Image (cartoon, rainbow, N blue to C red):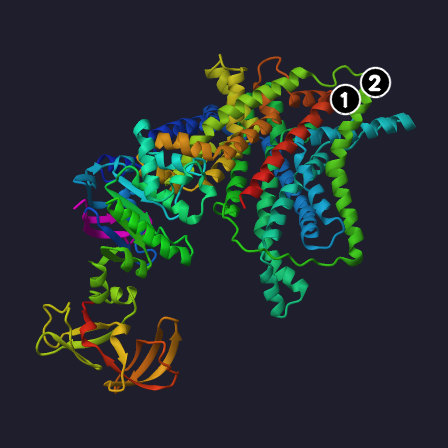
């Protein structure tokens, strides 16, 4: 582990609830880790704690084996081996690209080559003499990245790095930045509230809510096996259905049928215990043979996919299920449809 | 923030036990200078309190009939000036912002320009026009060969001069409120079936009240701390009586007692003024085109409106400049020798330059602490450095005179002590521009430096200071220009034989040699035009 956090807590004076609440996780060298969560969940504070721009109220942070923050040790940010890319890039407007990147380098002679090498890596070798104001948003972003990478830090911290870019550029920069980070063998921690971004760039995602870690795992684990209803509904869309554990101790009986959840978070539960399951919209299929019948409430055409909301009225309860359908299929509001649930993609959720 | 001594004891104990963290986050190279600055800034008030406390007859002095009379005089003057400025400024603001007044743009500038007339110049001009030996007096005595007493001295004169000098403060804040008002609110009110008149009273006016209150309190503060106008017009408000007590050397302790009462009064107004101001105003206006405000058509009412604007501009602007020019030309015709003593101009320039340089060095750490390392403790330190905002010049001067005479006789009547007084008075002038440039810079850029392995000192030197250079220059210029205009501290503390532009005007006016005051007065108007121009261009930038 190149970075290890254990029980890191941050209280801000004037707030009763800690901004970061007993957070623990580790990052391995070369990994890209994403802190994902809604705004105000404490992810940026956590990043600033790792950088040393904030001091934890409790807990411990270890970077490359050195304890940088704990009850009785404190290493200030300038002495930590971190690089940071800020949301607004925070480039020095009065310094050229080259001077920006070289700002933190001590050794004047060796630095020239290092600066050029890093700028080559980010594809800006031809812009060394320019000033930040003369660069496009994407180029500024890459200067910020070069500046963070140039000292070969143990970890590069990126705070919502793509949120200032417009949609069309964002996708490209996402690919470019991850490629550059992979190429330089750097370890990186991203902060984002964009679940799609988190799923596409990370080796590991840490989902946060209200200062706490909700779930850690690979993008696939997070999406396919959400451990909590928060994760299930924040990362991708999800239909949450209540049920109870069957007598085999594994399957879950719900109004919509009985599912044997492959990935269970139902360990330790007894038959008859209440649980919630998450059914992703892409595991629901409109199928004339389908066992569940309902009426189409809403049709949301999105180009590459169409979302429909199907109202299923059962004896006691009504469910509004979100279903992905192929946009070639013409479905109107009010249509009666049958749907099928593919049992492999149903996950039990420990609340 | 209230702080009791027992609290402090508790906190120290907690701190020792390690249960309380050090209340400052700032590095030592910021914190230590700020502590020194705060101590120095609190010296005049602290010493004044000690001196008054030490006096045996403190209570007798305080309850003297004269004290009460001066207090009533001062409060009456401040109240009258505040009311009359509001009466002038609110209609002016409305006419120049929300109506089709002919020449609206020119009027909105002309009605604001009297801000450049320092009170010393305003007082001089009024006396040189209507007082003994003034233009009107000369004219009448020459023409009709009779002698008469110009009845301008006392309350009336002080009230008239201060009203004409200070109404732009209310105008400025009300105009700002009118201009910043959201047109869509009035449109919403219209769609809800309200008439324009109802809209003014129900939607527009309630939103102007804070601006009127804020501007009015600034006027009250201006009146309380003004020395030159009340003294030249011989009205016994605090500043004049304090000066006379000191000069007359009858009872210097009494001067201190009066000064302390004046300080309490100004502090009260300052605290009210701060409450109306709310938090930092440095928010950028959102993007998107701003729609033009609806203009009210005046119709035939435009004639009285034009006459009103003309009278105000004539009295507040044309009169002081015209009177100065009159005496200058008259002096030139009569071959007056002392049109301008170069020595005085040089002295003013010299003292103001030193003050600007030292002032900015002193202000920078305070601004950094208050913007970057906000905490209860740091805001207390910052507040202390605003002492000059609440302390009238005469009070600071008086306190330093006593301090110098008793404890620092080698400094008494030397340049360093004079510069010290100037810095106490004008440090807040630089704080605004420094703070706003730091706020606009944002902390991320400094944090970025930290994550690149640079020390805070290096970041200050090679990132922060270069990037806030415009703010530094503005702050220095404002200190420089305000120092040039200062009178009471200059009179009381300057080295023997030191003449400045302001003391020249003062001496010439009190001795009725108006010709000698004309050029310094015009120079001061030009100087204060510069400082105003800087302030305004800075305000534009912050939007």
**Picture coordinates of residue B405, whole percent (x, y):** 50, 16
A159 lies left or right of A351: right
- The answer to whether the residues at label 2 and label 1 have Cβ atoms under 8 Å apart is yes
In the image as oriented, which residue stretches furthest toward the right? Answer: B144
Figure label count: 2
Task: Compute the Cα span from label 2 to label 1.
Answer: 10 Å
In which quadrant of the rendered image does the C terminus of chain A lie? bottom left
In the image as oriented, which residue stretches furthest toward the left? Answer: A248
Q: Secondary structure at mark 2?
A: helix
Q: Which residue in the protein does label 2 denote?
A: B334
Q: Which mark is residue A291?
A: none
Compare marks 2 and 1 and give the one earlier in the sequence.
2
Depth check, front residue: A313 or B79: A313
| Residue A105 seen in this snapshot | no
**Picture coordinates of residue A65, whole percent (x, y):** 16, 40
Q: Which residues are magenta?
A: A1-28
């Amino acid at each position: 582990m190149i970075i290890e956090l254990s029980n890191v807590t941050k209280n801000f004076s004037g707030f009763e609830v800690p901004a970061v609440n007993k957070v623990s996780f580790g990052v391995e060298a070369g990994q890209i880790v994403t802190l994902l969560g809604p705004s105000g969940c404490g992810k940026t504070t956590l990043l600033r704690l790792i950088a040393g721009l904030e001091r934890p109220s409790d807990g411990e942070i270890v970077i490359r084996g050195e304890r940088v923050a704990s009850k009785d040790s404190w290493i200030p940010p300038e002495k930590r081996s971190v690089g940071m890319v800020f949301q607004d890039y925070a480039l020095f407007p009065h310094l050229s690209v080259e001077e920006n990147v070289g700002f933190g380098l001590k050794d004047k002679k060796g630095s020239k080559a290092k600066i050029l090498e890093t700028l080559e890596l980010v594809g800006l070798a031809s812009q060394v003499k320019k000033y930040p104001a003369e660069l496009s948003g994407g180029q500024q972003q890459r200067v910020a990245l070069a500046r963070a990478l140039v000292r070969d830090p143990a970890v590069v911290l990126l705070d919502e790095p793509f949120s200032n870019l417009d949609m069309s550029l964002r996708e490209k920069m996402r690919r470019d930045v991850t490629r550059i980070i992979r190429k330089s063998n750097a370890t990186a921690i991203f902060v984002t509230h964009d679940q799609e971004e988190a799923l596409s760039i990370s080796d590991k995602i840490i989902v946060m809510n209200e200062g706490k870690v909700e779930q850690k795992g690979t993008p696939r684990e997070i999406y396919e096996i959400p451990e909590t209803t928060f994760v299930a509904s924040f990362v991708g869309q999800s239909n949450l259905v209540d049920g109870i554990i069957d007598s085999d101790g594994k399957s879950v009986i719900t109004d919509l049928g009985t599912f044997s959840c492959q990935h269970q978070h139902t360990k330790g539960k007894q038959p008859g215990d209440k649980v919630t399951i998450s059914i992703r919209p892409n595991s629901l299929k409109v199928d004339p043979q389908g066992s569940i019948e309902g009426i189409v409430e809403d049709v949301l055409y999105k180009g590459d996919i169409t979302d429909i909301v199907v109202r299923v009225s059962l004896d006691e309860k009504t469910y509004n299920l979100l279903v992905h359908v192929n946009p070639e299929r013409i479905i109107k509001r009010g249509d009666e449809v049958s749907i099928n649930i593919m049992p492999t993609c149903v996950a039990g959720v420990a609340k | 923030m209230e702080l009791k001594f027992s609290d402090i004891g508790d906190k120290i104990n907690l701190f020792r036990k390690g249960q309380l963290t050090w209340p400052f986050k700032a590095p030592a190279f910021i914190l230590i200078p700020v502590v020194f600055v705060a101590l120095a800034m609190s010296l005049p008030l602290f010493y004044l309190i000690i001196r008054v406390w030490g006096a045996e007859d403190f209570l007798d002095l305080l309850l003297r009939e004269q004290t009460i009379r001066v207090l009533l005089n001062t409060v009456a003057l401040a109240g009258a000036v505040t009311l009359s400025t509001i009466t002038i400024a609110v209609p002016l603001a409305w006419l120049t912002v929300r109506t089709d007044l002919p020449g609206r743009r020119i009027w909105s500038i002309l009605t604001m320009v009297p801000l450049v007339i320092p009170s010393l110049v305003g007082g001089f001009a009024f006396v040189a026009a209507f007082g003994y030996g003034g233009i009107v007096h000369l004219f009448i005595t020459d023409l009709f060969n009779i002698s008469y007493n110009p009845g301008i001295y006392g309350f009336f004169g002080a009230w008239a001069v201060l009203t004409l000098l200070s109404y732009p403060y209310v105008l400025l804040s009300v105009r700002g409120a009118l201009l910043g008002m959201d047109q869509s609110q009035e449109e919403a009110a219209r769609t809800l079936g309200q008439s324009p008149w109802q809209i003014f009273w129900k939607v527009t006016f309630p939103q102007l009240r804070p601006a009127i209150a804020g501007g009015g309190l600034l006027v009250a503060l201006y009146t309380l701390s003004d020395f030159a106008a009340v003294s030249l017009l011989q009205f016994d408000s605090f500043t004049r009586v304090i000066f006379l007590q000191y000069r007359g050397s009858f009872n210097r302790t009494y001067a201190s007692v009066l000064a302390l009462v004046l300080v309490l009064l100004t502090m009260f107004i300052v605290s009210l003024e701060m409450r109306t101001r709310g938090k930092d105003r440095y928010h950028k206006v959102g993007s998107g085109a701003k729609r033009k405000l609806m203009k009210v058509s005046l119709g035939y009412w435009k004639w009285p409106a034009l006459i009103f604007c003309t009278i105000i501009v004539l009295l507040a602007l044309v009169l002081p400049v015209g009177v100065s020019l009159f005496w200058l030309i008259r002096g030139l015709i009569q071959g007056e020798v002392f049109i301008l003593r170069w020595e005085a101009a040089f002295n003013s320039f010299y003292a103001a330059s030193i003050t600007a340089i030292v002032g900015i060095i002193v202000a920078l750490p305070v601004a950094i602490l208050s913007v970057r390392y906000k905490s209860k403790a740091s805001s207390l330190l910052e507040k202390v450095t605003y002492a000059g905002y609440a302390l009238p010049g005469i009070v600071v001067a008086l306190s330093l005179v006593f301090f110098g005479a008793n404890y620092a006789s080698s400094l008494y009547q030397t340049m360093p002590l004079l510069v010290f007084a100037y810095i106490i008075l004008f440090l807040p002038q630089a704080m605004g521009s420094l703070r706003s440039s730091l706020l606009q810079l944002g902390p991320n850029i400094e944090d970025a430096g930290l994550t690149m392995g640079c020390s805070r000192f290096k970041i200050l030197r090679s990132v922060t200071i270069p990037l806030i250079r415009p703010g530094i220059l503005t702050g220095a210029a404002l200190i420089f220009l305000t120092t040039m205009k200062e009178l009471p501290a200059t009179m009381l503390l300057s080295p023997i034989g030191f003449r400045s532009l302001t003391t020249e005007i003062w001496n010439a006016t009190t001795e009725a040699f108006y010709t000698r005051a004309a050029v310094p007065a015009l120079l001061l108007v030009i100087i204060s035009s510069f400082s105003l121009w800087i302030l305004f261009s800075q305000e534009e930038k912050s939007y």
